[in-house]
Image (spheres, rainbow, N blue to C red):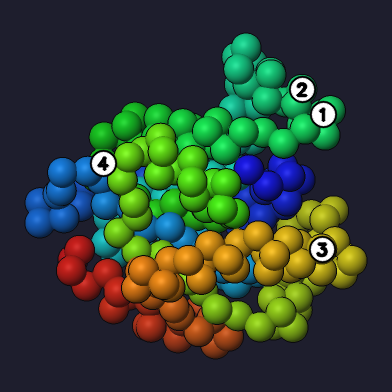
Amino acid sequence: LCPPCAACAEAGEATASAAAPASAGAAAAHPTVVFVLGGPGAGKGTQCANIVRDFGFTHLSAGDLLRAHMKSGSADGNMVAEMIKQGQIVPSEVTVNLLLGAMKDSGKSTFLIDGFPRNKENRDAWERTAGYDCDFVLFFDCPEDVMLQRLLGRNEGRTDDNVETIKKRFKTFQESSMPVVQYYEGLGKVRSVAATASPEAVYADTEGHFAKFK
């Protein structure tokens, strides 16, 4: 897992949300999993909400699940919180197990996993623990200058949304997450969407990748 401060910074872009069950045609031997990646401010949360609404996926944010786990008061949650307090890196298996638990608890079969895997360690832990790979990666490709303006334009009271911190988040994404995107590109699993236009225009390009789930 990447340093938790980076995970938490982007977690606010999306919240876990559940929708109606997917059509029977989407059922498979294992759940349908789509990893959703893109830099901070690429618009992942907005587009995930649209997919939930129109295609019945369940949306899970890895960062949100980790934060909720730390606040749960459980022994394991307290241990994770203490690791973060001490500046230690939380093992990727913790995040993967939280995701798998949320998937099981939802009772659903089609999932958008937002902001994961953030790095190679995340990806390796998913493959070891889940035992199956994602169906595809939905990648929102957006220039840093556009993402920067979006983040600065937010009115969410987020203390981390200043230029210096945002640029650090961009650097982390380029160094840790883009190699994951490139790995899946090599497997032919990336569905890339240009994310510079309006949310409506971006979604018009996004929804075609989910037509088989209608």
Q: Residues within 10 Å of mark 3 (few under 14, many from 20)?
A: few
Could you tell which of marks 2 and 3 lies nearer the N-terminus?
2
- Residue receiving disc 3: 168
Q: Earlier in the sequence, mark 2 or mark 4?
A: 2
Residue under label 1, please give it: 85
The quadrant holding residue 186 is bottom left
Q: Amino acid at mark 4?
A: Lys
- The alpha-carbon separation of the residues under discs 2 and 4 comes to 32 Å
* Distance from the alpha carbon under mark 1 to that under mark 4: 34 Å
Which circle's residue, 1 or 3, is located before the other in the chain? 1
Describe residue 45's horizontal placement relative to residue 77 as left or right.
left
- The residue nearer to you, when weighing 185 against 24, is 185
Q: Amino acid at mark 2?
A: Glu
| Callout in the foreground (2, 4) | 2
**Marks 2 and 3, how far apart in space?**
24 Å
Task: Write down the residue under mark 2.
Answer: 82
Distance of mark 2 from mark 1, alpha carbons? 5 Å
Residue 189 at x, y = what percent?
A: 35, 69
Q: Residues within 10 Å of mark 4 (few under 14, many from 20)?
A: many
Q: Is residue 96 above or below residue 111?
A: above
The amino acid type of the residue labelled 3 equals Lys
Q: Judge the density around disc 2: few (<14), some (14-19), many (≥20) Cα neighbours within 10 Å.
A: some
Q: In this rendered view, identify the residue nearer to me: 178 or 72.
A: 178
> Is residue 199 toward the left or the right of residue 24 in the image?
right
Quadrant location of the C terminus? Answer: bottom left
Q: Residue at position x 82%, y 34% from top?
A: 87
Residue 30 shown left or right of residue 141 in the figure: left
Between disc 4 and disc 3, the foreground one is 3
Residue where numbered disc 4 is placed: 108
